[in-house]
């Protein structure tokens, strides 16, 4: 089974900051990596799929990169509505798996 | 508008059973694979199960294999999760989601399952 490890588990940032979240897979998953955003009490929302493709309607300040085992989600200029928890997920093989999440909080 | 609405959650005793439903609308349900994902209180997301468009291909997480059964009725645009032998650690919000290349694209609002005596 593929384990997904995110870092950091939480971070504090200010509006306008550049934020980077890392996700590492326990084995190579090619580019089969997705990112989700979840706000308190709400269902997750798909942000980025296939490592770097932006889901329809997602602002361009979100971007993804990486391949193999190491992946990154970047928010170029943090906005008030971006404070949330972010999860990576591998869809390379079953069982599918999520990272533990990164909570982005207001500094 | 694409919409998924889960139902069937509630309070159940350990060892009990529950059947969750997910009603789909606004898209061709028979053309979409589907997932169940859960989130325990204060915890992260856990993928549980996937079913293909026809139901011919099914996968489970080890944590629920042998206890949970995923199924679908394309005529009713509905997805189901039969949960047996429930444990305290199954307490969570359960989400259904549409699948595209095994990523979860559209999510329901979730239904809460509490396993407690």
Image: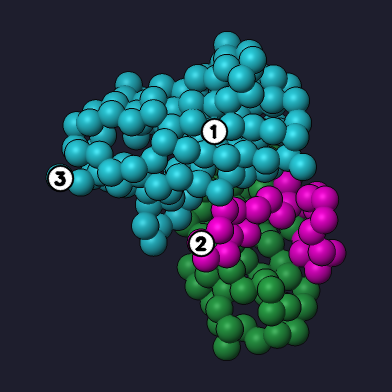
Chain colours: A green, B cyan
Give the percent coordinates (x, y) of residue A86.
59, 61
Q: Residues within 10 Å of mark 3 (few under 14, many from 20)?
A: few
Residue pointed to by mark 1 = B22
Q: Residue at x 65, y 86 (%)?
A: A14
Q: Could you tell me how far apart the alpha carbons at marks 1 and 2 are, in whole angstroms?
A: 19 Å
Is label 1 on the same chain as label 3?
yes
Give the percent coordinates (x, y) of residue A97.
51, 42
Disc 1 and disc 2 in contact, CB within 8 angstroms? no
Q: Could you tell me how far apart the alpha carbons at marks 2 and 3 are, in whole angstroms?
A: 25 Å
State the extent of the magenta-drawn residues as a range: A36-63
Say whether disc 1 or disc 3 marks the residue closer to the N-terminus: 1
Q: Residues within 10 Å of mark 2 (few under 14, many from 20)?
A: few
Disc 1 and disc 3 in contact, CB within 8 angstroms? no
Which residue is more in the foreground, B39 or B1? Answer: B1
* Residue B76 painted magenta: no
Residue pointed to by mark 3 = B117
Residue pointed to by mark 2 = A41
| Direction left: furthest residue | B117
**Label 2's element?**
loop
- In the rendered image, the quadrant that contains the C terminus of chain A is bottom right
């Amino acid at each position: 089974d593929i384990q997904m490890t995110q870092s950091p588990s939480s971070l504090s940032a200010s509006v306008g900051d550049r934020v980077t979240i890392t996700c590492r897979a326990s084995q190579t998953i090619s580019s089969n990596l997705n990112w989700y955003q979840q706000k308190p009490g709400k269902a997750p929302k798909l942000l980025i799929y296939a490592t770097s493709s932006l889901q329809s309607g997602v602002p361009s300040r979100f971007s993804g990169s990486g391949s193999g085992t190491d992946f990154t989600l970047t928010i170029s200029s943090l906005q008030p509505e971006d404070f949330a928890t972010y999860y990576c997920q591998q869809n390379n093989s079953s069982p599918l798996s999520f990272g533990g999440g990164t909570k982005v909080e207001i500094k | 508008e694409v919409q998924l609405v889960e139902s069937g959650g509630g309070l159940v005793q350990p060892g009990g059973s529950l059947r969750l439903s997910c009603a789909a609308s606004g898209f061709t349900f028979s053309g979409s694979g589907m997932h169940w994902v859960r989130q325990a209180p204060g915890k992260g997301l856990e993928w549980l199960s996937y079913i293909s468009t026809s139901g011919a291909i099914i996968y489970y997480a080890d944590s629920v294999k042998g206890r949970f059964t995923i199924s679908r009725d394309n005529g009713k645009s509905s997805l189901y999760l039969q949960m047996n032998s429930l444990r305290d650690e199954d307490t969570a919000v359960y989400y259904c989601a549409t699948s595209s290349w095994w990523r979860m694209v559209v999510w329901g609002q979730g239904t809460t399952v509490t396993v407690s005596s």
